Image (cartoon, helix red, strand yellow):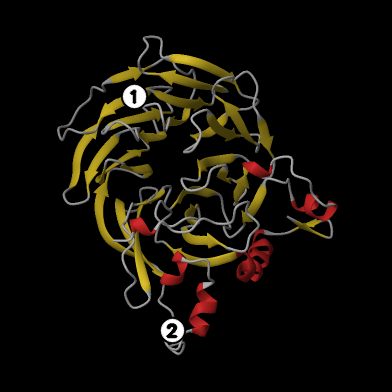
Amino acid sequence: METQGKPLSVDEEYDLWKSNVPLMYDFVSETRLTWPSLTVQWLPTPVQEPENGIIKQELIIGTHTSGEEENYLKFAEIDLPKEILTDEDPQEETEKDDEASTPPPRSNIKITAKYEHKEEITKARYMPQDPNIVATINGQGTVFLYSRAGGLQSTLKFHKDNGYALSFNPLIKGQLLSGSDDHTVALWDANGSSDSTTPIRSWNDLHTDIVNDSKWHNFNEALFGTVSEDSFMKINDTRVDNTTIDIVKCPQPFNTLAFSHHSSNLLAAAGMDSHVYLYDLRNMDEPLHHMSGHEDAVTNLEFSPHVDGVVVSSGSDNRLIMWDLKQIGAEQTPDDAEDGVSELIMIHAGHRSAVNDFDMNLQIPWLVASTEEENILQVWKCSHSLPVVGGPPKVNKDIIS
């Protein structure tokens, strides 16, 4: 970001972002953690009827203490204003409330449970079919299974080096993929409770360098994708012996990939060259399109679970970007074109260091949690007035219990 040709400092960009928060967000909360968290994920917490004007949501975070203290897997709770369920500005609603003299609820993170963890947590993910089970992976590539009620359940040892790739199969209970800097990928059965050093299946030859990410397909239970520092993206099928069914040579190494929740043929991938690439599984020879907006490597990608065609990316440039694929190629005025490509919805510039991880809330559309290197965890929801095609979705009242 620049002003009059001069790049803004990190603090100047943050101050500019803060000044625009009322225009771009319905809600923003920032919490300083004791230690950085390399991972964050919303737990699928049912949305209860608001109590005293607030609702509660839960998160998984970790610690990276660099050996200075014990590391922990943590479960956290955040209070959110009830207006976050609507298309109204929570601040405006508070001002209009008859009880406006009562301060709005604080939205800081409260730790509700924590369990000791061997070394830093590089990633933590819950099992979709049983959210009480959480898998983690650490700097040695060891995978751990935790129960929210009972703590550590299993230690799964196979990898010989640091791991960042960790993904539960959304369609088969207990199937867990892990990938490591030692170039290997492993498939585990996370349904058991005993320690194991033997995966269901392992691959030593999928890649010849660090495995940066692995993700399951959301419609085909046998398909998963992997990306690596060897500059290849591979689509793999567990039903066949040779596994790999498609190979893409990347312009530069991809750090992350994601499959659409709405289209069985659409996936996105991104990495060191800062672009976000879109692919069609039916023809992987060339990308469908690439999107420019980041100023450094892209580290994480996710498709919105609520809105078809919405993708969110985060990167080493301290930013998260929301994209609307339905706006690719849309006409722009010269002024709009200066702000970014037509498919760019918004840039979240609230972080002052590289974004480690983010997650989109399954229960509350557009609500995002993101964590950065400098110990900060943010929870935010973009403004309902942003020009997204079709408008922001309503909360599904069926999920309120």
What number of labels is visible? 2
The quarter of the displayed image where residue 347 is located: bottom right
Looking at the image, is mark 1 or mark 2 nearer the viewer? Answer: 2
SS for tag 2? Answer: loop
In three-dimensional space, the C-alpha distance between marks 1 and 2, rounded to whole angstroms, equals: 50 Å
Say which residue appears at 51% left-offset and 67% top-offset.
27
Across and down, in percent, residue 119 comes to 32, 43
Q: Earlier in the sequence, mark 1 or mark 2?
A: 2
Query: In this view of the protein, which residue sits in the foreground, 147 or 7?
Result: 147
Can you say which quadrant of the picture contains the N terminus?
Answer: bottom right
Q: Which mark is residue 186?
A: 1
Say which residue appears at 48% left-offset and 14% top-offset.
245
Across and down, in percent, residue 265 comes to 52, 28
Query: In this view of the protein, which residue sits in the foreground, 2 or 92?
Result: 92
Amino acid at circle 2: Pro
Query: In this view of the protein, which residue sits in the foreground, 361 or 35?
Result: 361
Across and down, in percent, residue 264 comes to 48, 30
Q: Which mark is residue 103?
A: 2
Q: Dot 1 surroundings within 10 Å: few (below 14), some, or many (20 or more)?
A: many
- 190 versus 102 height, above or below: above
SS for tag 1? Answer: strand
The quarter of the displayed image where residue 26 is located: bottom right
- 345 versus 199 height, above or below: below
Say which residue appears at 50% left-offset and 52% top-offset.
373
Amino acid at circle 1: Ala
Say which residue appears at 35% left-offset and 26% top-offset.
160
